[in-house]
Amino acid sequence: MHKFEKYDPSVIESDWYEWWQKQGLFKPSKNDVQCTGKTDSGDFSMLLPPPNVTGVLHIGHALTLSIQDVIARWNRMNGRSVNWVPGTDHAGISLQSVVEKRLRRESGKTRHDLGRKEFLDLVWKYKRSHGDQIKKQTMRIGASLNWDSEYFTMDAHHSQTVRDAFIRLYDDGLVYRATKMVNWSCALQSVISDIEVDKIPTSGSVLVNVPDSGTSSTDIRYKITPAHDADDYACARRHGLPVVRVFGNNGRVVDEPGIAVFVGKSRWEARKMVIKQLTDSCAYLGKRDADESIISVCSRSGDVIEPMLMPQWYIRCDKLGQNADSLVVSGDIDIVPARQKAVWHSWMSGITDWCVSRQLWWGHRIPMYYVYWNSEINRAGSWVAAIDENQAREKALGMLSAAERDIAVSIERGAVCTISQDEDVLDTWFSSGLLPLTIFNNTRKDEGGVLEPCQSTDIFERKKALSTLLETGQDILFFWVARMVILCSYFAKIPPFSTVLLHPMVRDAQGRKMSKSLGNIIDPMDIINGAGLGKLEDTMKNGNLSKEELRNSTKELRRMYPQGFQRFGADALRLTLILYTQQTHQINLSLDNVRASYHFCNKLWNAFRFIHSHAEKLELSPESLSSVQRGQYEAWMHGLDRAKLTIFDRALLSQISTMLKVYHRAMETRKYAVAAEAVRDFVQRELCDRYIEVSKAALFGNAKNTTNQELWQRHARRDARDDMSVMQSGWQAQDSTGFIVDDLLAENETGHSVHLELPTDDGSTFTVAVGSLADMQEQQKVRQMIMPHIDCIRMMSREQGVCIRVLGKEGEFGKMTSTFAADGVVTVVVSPHVHVFARVANGQQREPGQAPARTQEAHALASSRLEMDIEKLCRMIDSDGYQMNAPRAVKEKDR
């Protein structure tokens, strides 16, 4: 307990993470978990989607971490051994782009000036100096990850998995090389995937296709570019037209016959020159307003994508996709929310082959070698998949026919002339798609068997998947999740995970996508640590924005956050993000909600400050709790002397029971926002606004009794062990029925119906709802009698842990004889016309002739105690402190 008054998240949150790690609390172990409720023994494994190694934590990462941390801690506290594995992605395009820009800025050189080896050394150096930032930020947000299993996608072990997987796929006939239309980024000098292409809707003037200037008016043909447009390419194929490449990889016009005047010009310069030439030759027909269209832009460089016809490596996905789809159809993989299954099936049914080659240097170099044969071997060059050049040579020689081998033997210099490895690297999605194999299919890791079918009997028989759950954003369902299913199930023969849980995208308060150009990006660290407007502007200036974008973004930033960000802390941000998960399509993040969560954390902090500050007055100390040993908590809870509990105590315990039911049900059905709401509302309304206010009356008066001691002890840490963390506790895993003071409470759990005990001719009684009385006149009399006290009755019925039954005054509806006195129920007079039968013991209704459960003296004592409680409630309501501090809604409800 920190010895300071004010809630300061920067102080409270600063030193816990290091202590958690030193205690080994994030490691997969069941030994220290104290859980006495019903649990599901066994392991729980989950992979954290790898962020870019040199990136920074954005709000999407914070959402993923918050959700997954809730899941991990919940499973630990339910007795499971949790292995939540962190790691980072080498981010091929992103990191290479950052290093290249820095190299150009500092030295004016390009990577080609340095050469491949020297440039890669520079990238590794940059990674080592900048690669820990996102890890530190992940720790700052409090994620309970198993750092002992941390991975990096360029580590030697995973690199071997990637290399071997590609070779296996090629040898199995699933990898091929073909020339197709690709998304080419002239700025990055690489093919990029569809996920890295932003589709920008546009409208306005566009150029129309014009007749060839060399044709007559009766022979009109149109100029097309088959090598740079998918539709034009299809047209050229249909009509047998030549496919002529106009632009080079740098986006400039190449040297082709007939276009010498344009050679070396950029795409934009050449197009202007074309219009001028057409105008000069009177062939330009003008322009027209175009309908809405789409421009493809590289999300990383902002460059307009140039469709290019280029040879690349592809993976055949038809059969692999069918297998992945069947795993969802059969239920071997469950996708949550269920509506995403239809999207999955639709995408898998139309899946196309996957282009996996990238024209980069940083990444997993494709293990393909081109073999050039000597002239004596009358054979075209051959591609060979191999781990190195020596193996490539051996495989190539094995491809020769018997006759060719005879010739090869006679050649002094050998059959092979030269061997060269493909310059390209593999798509990072291919690398990350194999992560579950590297991390979880480790039964034969020492033998390099992560690509072999899963041999673990424990995994195969019990879980039938490499891991338990994958939680990630719905935007990468196909680009990462699908590829993990495709690749891992092909090699391991079981799914990579049993369940896929998808969360929505985070947008700003207006529902707009967060982007630097809009100036609406929210850095989680700025929310946690606080940031003035000046710091936010400096961060934006260091981004890759144009002058115009920076000017507009700064204006928007000042409008949205004129005072910057308050220091809210990690707990407030995490709670806010969890509460937001109710928005299933997209999350519109508002700082007002983060501020509300901060106030909740402050309220919780003050509640426990209040408890600890009065512990001595209540004669509570760690020593007084020593009787509550580990493993004995449930027995102690059920063994409470309920006769010592006031109606306020019973109300709180009843609300705890109700809250736990909602909480458990929500967690089990993955409705984490509902679980968070249940806890938040209980703490705010029931614990702080009501129970603590009631307790103040007792504490600041002269009251001193065992009731308050026992209740405070109930909420104190039940173990005197100083090195025990709450995450080792199984408290919320208790069977919630253990908190129900009266088993009849469930009858009135909702608190919306008041019942009457009406007599029958044989002297027994039966219960009917007020609204079901047959005689409308009688019903009206009952309503008139009850309504002045209805709020009090509802509150007691719902919250006090007692079962409330309402009677009219004797003789109102005939003879009303209570036989409850011998059954642990006493009568409390609320008004001359309303008597409340309150059950004060946990006894059951006795059968005719059965001995009374309690003595008349005990019932008289219980009746007296209830009357004192009601009197205390009235004094509390009338007290100045209550009238000054209790919220209006609470006061109205209590009255």
Image: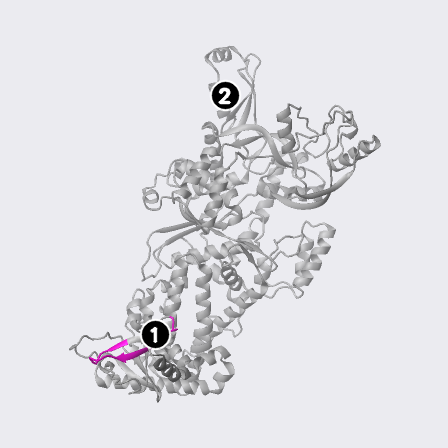
- Residue 118 % position (x, y): 62, 36
- Residue 550 % position (x, y): 71, 54
Q: Residue at x 51, y 69 (%)?
A: 600
Q: Nearer the viewer, mark 1 or mark 2?
A: 1
> Range of the magenta residues?
750-766
Task: Based on the picture, tell me whether residue 753 belongs to the magenta stretch.
Answer: yes
Q: Nearer the viewer, residue 506 or 343?
A: 343
559 vs 121, left or right, is right
| Residue 891 visible (yes or no) | yes
Q: Disc 1 to disc 2, how far (Cα)?
A: 89 Å
499 vs 99, left or right, is left
Q: Earlier in the sequence, mark 1 or mark 2?
A: 2
Name the residue carrying label 2: 396
Name the residue carrying label 1: 772
Q: Secondary structure at mark 2?
A: helix
Task: Based on the picture, tell me whether residue 64 belongs to the magenta stretch.
Answer: no
